[in-house]
Every structure is written in C-alpha cells, then in structure tokens.
Image (cartoon, rainbow, N blue to C red):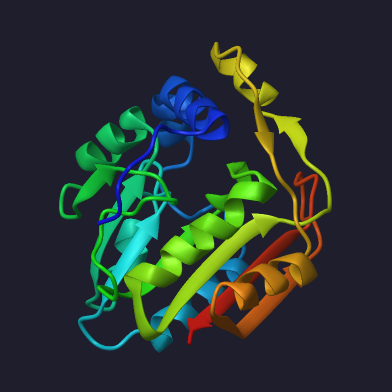
Amino acid sequence: MPPTDAPSPAATAARRFYDEVADTYAARLPGTDAELPIDLAMIHHLLDLVPAGGRILDAGCGAGRLLPLLASRGAQVDGIDISCDMVRRAREDHPAHPVVVAELTALPHDAGALDAVVSWYSTIHIPDDELACALVEIRRVLQPGGHVLLAFQTGDAPRTVGHGFAAFGHQVSITRWHRSLTAMTALLERSSFEIAARLERAAHGAEPDGQGFMIGRAV
C-alpha cells in the first residue's frame, strides 16, 4: 500500500460535503433506480469482463448502492470512500461487503490485487491536476488485463453543484469537474490503459448534463 499523504483541498472539501449529506443521500438514492438501462448496460458489460469469482473495487462507493449489483454474479466486492459518514452508511446498509475510508489517489490494495475497479461518478470531484494520479493508482491495483469503469458528467469546465440539498436542510456546495470523452481517453491512455468501450449520451429528463461512460483495459 502506498504512503498516505495529507488530503488535498479538493479531497477535504469532498469529505466535508458527503459527510454532511450522507444520510439524506443514502435515503433518497438507495439503489440504481436513478440509472437508465443504457447506463446499467455499461456495468453489466464490465461484469462480463470480470472472471468468475474475481475481485472488484467500488472506488468512491458512497453509501454502497452499487455493491449488490457488482456482486450479483459472484464477484468479491469491496468499497472505499473518502467520506466517513458515507462509509458508515455503506456498512449499515450493505454489511456483506467490506468498506473502508480511503482516497482514489491512495488505494488500500496491493499492486495487481484486483480484476476491476468501478469509479461511478467519483472522479468528478478530483481536479484535473490530480486526476492523472488517481488513474495511475487505479492502474497500480489492477492486474494486467484488468478493467476500470468510469462514469462522469460530460463537458469541459468545472461548476459548483449541490445546492439542491438545501431543500433537505443542508447548506452545502461542491465543485464538480466535467470532462469530454476525448479528454478522458487521453488520460486513460497516458495511464497505461487501452479503451475497451466508451459511451456518451445526452441529458435525460431532469438531468442538466450529458453523461459519459468508459471502460479501460490495463496494459
């Protein structure tokens, strides 16, 4: 396991934000009902690529809403999240899966230990100058031929989000970084991944932004 440095300002901001909203978030988004079938298809495609009984990390698992789906075909699944209160909720709501507090830039796994890493909207709070480090760290814990799945909002500029939690008594906000599939492709390729699948879709319903999904294969 690599040494853990002091968290960056962005990491500290993410921890404070999600500690504040953890219980509200978990209550309002307990599973994958918010995802479209096309979104879930990317998760199922990743699961098709994982060997039977393989190890999957949900990196940025929040309250653990993806853990049952990732384990639905017999994979060994654990999670990490930067928020102590999100980890508390994940442990309460999904006790079958080990979940610990950690950052994407310092994963608590040995090199080559995992068959897949899922980063479902967890890179969105990592600034551009730190994202490459996170992808290199994900590559470190994957065995050769392992896969990473990324989900993110598309665009080319950061924005401040989170004001909707005010309706539930939380006066909070956080920066969210939006990226194009072209930019994410370049970052993955520089981090020793080849692109196995990529999908971009337009905003749907009340969504203000398009969505991007990418699967990279560790080389």
| 118 to the left or right of 95 | right
State left or right for residue 35 relative to residue 84. right
Q: Against 57, is 16 above or below?
A: above
**Residue pictured at 21% horizontal, 37% vertical:** 92
Residue at coordinates 37% horizontally, 58% vertically from top-left?
58
Give the quadrant of residue 206.
Answer: top right
Q: Residue 88 location in percent, x, y?
A: 26, 33
- Direction from residue 162 to residue 75 in the image, left or right: left
Residue 103 image position (x, y, % from top left): 40, 45
Could you say which quadrant of the image residue 191 lies in? bottom right
The reply to whether residue 38 is visible in this rendering is no
Q: Is residue 204 above or below residue 16?
A: below
Please tell me which residue lies in front, 7 or 40: 7
Residue 52 at least partly seen: yes
Q: Is residue 134 left or right of residue 178?
A: left
Residue farthest left in this picture: 96
The quarter of the image holding the N terminus is bottom left
Residue, x 45% and y 20% (percent of image)? 20
> Which residue is located at x 24 percent, y 87 percent?
52
Residue 199 locus on image (x, y percent): 70, 75
* Image x and y of residue 111, in percent: 28, 70
Question: Which one is nearer the viewer's eye here, 211 or 187?
Answer: 187
Foreground pick, 67 / 172: 172
User: How many numbered marks does the figure carry?
Assistant: 0
